[in-house]
Image (tube, rainbow, N blue to C red):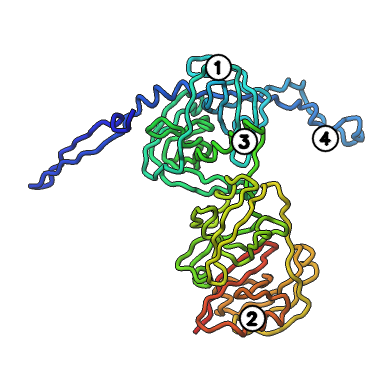
Amino acid sequence: MTRSLRYCALAALVTLGTFSLTVSAALPEFREIVKEASPAVVKIIVEQRAADPGKAHPDMEQIPDYLRRFFDFPGTPQSPMPRTGTGSGFIVSKDGFIVTNNHVVDGADSVLVRMIDRREFEAEVVGTDPRSDLALLRIEASGLPALRLGTSDELEVGEWVLAIGSPFGLDFTVSQGIVSAKGRSLPTERGENYVPFIQTDVAINPGNSGGPLLNLDGEVVGVNSQIFTRSGGSNGLSFSIPASVVDNVITQLRENGRVTRGWLGVSIQDVDKNLADSFGLDRPRGALVAQVSPDSPAEKAGLKEGDVIITFDGKDIPTSSDLPHVVGLIAPGSKVPVELVRERKRKTLRVEVGGLDSEDSYSLARSTDESEAGGRIGVIVGPVPEEDLEQYGINGGVAVRQVAPGSAAAEAGIRPGDIITLVDNTPTKTVEAFERAEKKLQSGSSVPMRLIRRGSPLFIGLKLDD
């Protein structure tokens, strides 16, 4: 079945004054896709036993008599009622493997799968991956209809897509729209960012979670996962996990029951215009390395703070949020090239990617001297207080005491309390080292400066007056 067969022609005659314009447009035909895909889409019903309210109360025998009245609850305790929830999923193999969201089955005591022909199966949770919000289930059945995963990398903005699921419990509902954007970064509550979400305007509502996002070839290009809403319903901003991530995760869950990801061992930040100028880049791009963890794959490969990673494993890194997306899909132990900019020169290193569960700790250099000079940058610096060294786990840099209004430092956003550890690729382990680095700065130049702000590493671009 080719795409041309799934379109119907629409002709319109538009009259503007004495001019006539014939407009031809092609609209997609979804009926065949829905007929073929719907049998492999399932509704997922989960049940979670409610906690016994009696167990949540303190042991009354352990509470003094004069306090017990505060813990007495009137009435006869009611039997706890189980909580139920619904979501969607889809079959990926004829022998009963099913993909859904982790948040659909998280904490469930039982999982029931209902097919479009009303057959129901108890499902086993094979494995879950909270970082990608994916889960793999299995039911005891064979000869089942299954959907095939497409290649989300070839998906284009503006392309037609459709979703099938059970929004608000309305089974096997179909909605359609277009791809609005790709590679959306939506960090989790833990600050993790391993999924380059597909954004669409497909109507997605509670209950659609875990259902397939299909292209016009009937292939799954994503798993519907999140919506942006203020009302609880669809606002035309829905986000799906790309098929490339889905394929990687479910393969690992099926084979190993768990998921491991590539890990580099760096803290990164975006590159703005000032930083791009200071690092000699033609435009803002790449991931700026703000911190390298000891004994990490990055350190072993020779990566340094101040490096700007512009490609990783041959893939462009337009922004810092793109780096975790690329690294996370690489199998630990793989050796890949990293192209970076260091001291305004391009350099290529090879790094052996580690596993995500590796330790992530760091330390910096320590300063012992102090100074009271404003200097060309416009800051007064001093030694880092001992309690800050202990609190932040660092052992170097100079502490910013004051920032002169209107100075280069003020324009760059430097604040009192920041700890400066690097000026224009020169480490500032002591105040004297900071002063020497400051004197070497050329008027009118843009230079990078590395800070520790409340324990977090940060690069800024410093623009000096002419």
Task: Check disc 3 and give the amino acid type.
Answer: Gln
Q: Looking at the rendered structure, which numbered label has been put on residue 142?
A: 1
Q: Earlier in the sequence, mark 3 or mark 1?
A: 1
Instruction: Tell me the crowding category of disc 3: few under 14, some 14 to 19, or many 20 or more residues within 10 angstroms, Cα based.
Output: some
Residue at the image point whose x is 56% and y is 26% from the top? 98
Camera-nearest label, 1 or 2: 1
**Residue located beneath label 4 in the image:** 70
Disc 1 from disc 4: Cα separation: 57 Å
Q: How far apart are labels 3 and 2 at the CA level?
A: 50 Å
Q: Earlier in the sequence, mark 3 or mark 4?
A: 4
Q: Nearer the viewer, mark 3 or mark 4?
A: 3
Instruction: Name the image quarter holding residue 418.
Output: bottom right
Q: Earlier in the sequence, mark 4 or mark 2?
A: 4
Q: CA distance from mark 3 to mark 4?
A: 51 Å
Residue 276 lies, in percent from the top left, at: 50, 68
Callout 4: helix, strand or loop? helix
Q: Specify the amino acid type for callout 4.
A: Phe
Judge left or right: residue 390 versus residue 348. right
Label 2 sits on what residue type?
Ala
In the rendered view, tell whether residue 108 sits above or below residue 17: above
Query: Identity of the amino acid at label 1?
Result: Ser
* Disc number placed over residue 437 in the picture, else none: 2
Residue wearing tag 3 = 252
Q: Residues within 10 Å of mark 1 (few under 14, many from 20)?
A: few
Residue 458 in which image quadrant:
bottom right
